[in-house]
Image (tube, rainbow, N blue to C red):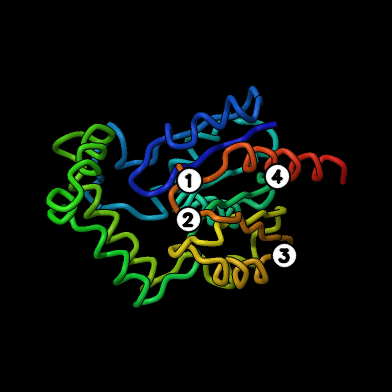
Amino acid sequence: MNILLLHGALGTKHQLGFLADCLDHTNCRSITFTGHGDSEVPLEGLSMEVFLRDIDHALEKVDGAVHLVGYSMGGYAALAWAAEHPGRVGSVVTIGTKLVWTPGSLADELKKLDPAMIAEKVPMFAEGLAAMHGEDRWKDLVSATARLITSLTDNPVLTDEVLAQVTAPTMLVVGDQDDMAGPEDTLRTARKLKDAGVVVLPFTRHPFEEIDLDLLVNLLTRFWEGLAQE
């Protein structure tokens, strides 16, 4: 079973990498998107097109169906890739993925993506970003991410037409207290997919670190076992 783990905005492959051991699948891997970790933000900036190329590269030597698991931004990319490659995707799982962007929600998120504010108001977060992405790169990444979500608001990649192209079974996971992804928007998106269900995690906010890992692994395992029996 081929599993590809896709991290969220401002993260790296290490954000979800530990799931590979928990899931006990030898063909489970995680990648770091362009502009994150040790790589520079490209001159053209960050975009879903850039991230989809990263997924292409990660899977170019993989035979058979792939099961995509993406947290937050990684889930958005997983659905977009699944729409482009329906024959190659065995299933999709999104975790805390914001699937509907509006001017209001964009404004809320842009307030959090100001490098100067982060450095001044949440210095420990800034130090963590510097450790992950480099002292000289993290601010560029934050700014590029702000431009990315602005673009996704103005020109959504996951339109109704694109979502209709996702044929693989899909499980959308969201916390009941996730004020970014939102259970309601997640449910609305599920209804636009051909074969999708929603799991709402109790007492769970957006940060991946707050998700009950044992519960998540159990959900993933049962989801994939169910597919194998079909």
Are circles 1 and 3 on residues that touch, CB within 8 Å?
A: no
* Nearest the eye: 75 or 177: 177
* Residue drawn at point x = 31 percent, y = 40 percent: 36
| Image location of residue 205, percent across then percent down | 47, 55
Q: Quote the CA–CA distance across marks 3 and 2.
A: 27 Å
Q: Which residue is situated farthest in the top direction here?
A: 26
| Image location of residue 138, percent across then percent down | 21, 42
- Residue on which the image places disc 2: 205
* Residue drawn at point x = 19 percent, y = 40 percent: 137
Q: Which residue is situated farthest in the right direction here?
A: 229
Q: Give the label, 1 or 3, closer to the camera.
A: 1
| Image location of residue 111, percent across then percent down | 24, 65
Q: Which residue is situated farthest in the bottom direction here?
A: 103
* Residue drawn at point x = 32 percent, y = 59 percent: 148
Q: How many marks?
A: 4
Question: The residue under label 3 is which amino acid type?
Answer: Lys
Question: Which comes sooner in the sequence, label 1 or label 3?
Answer: 3
Question: Which numbered disc covers residue 90?
Answer: 4
- Residue on which the image places disc 1: 210
Q: Quote the CA–CA distance across marks 1 and 4.
A: 27 Å
Question: The residue under label 2 is which amino acid type?
Answer: Arg
Question: Which comes sooner in the sequence, label 2 or label 4?
Answer: 4
* Nearest the eye: 140 or 181: 181
| Image location of residue 184, percent across then percent down | 57, 71
- Residue on which the image places disc 3: 194
Are circles 2 and 4 on residues that touch, CB within 8 Å?
A: no
Q: Dot 1 lies on which element?
A: helix
The N terminus lies in which quarter of the figure?
Answer: top right
Q: Quote the CA–CA distance across marks 1 and 3.
A: 30 Å
Question: The residue under label 4 is which amino acid type?
Answer: Gly
Are circles 1 and 4 on residues that touch, CB within 8 Å?
A: no
Q: Give the label, 1 or 4, closer to the camera.
A: 1
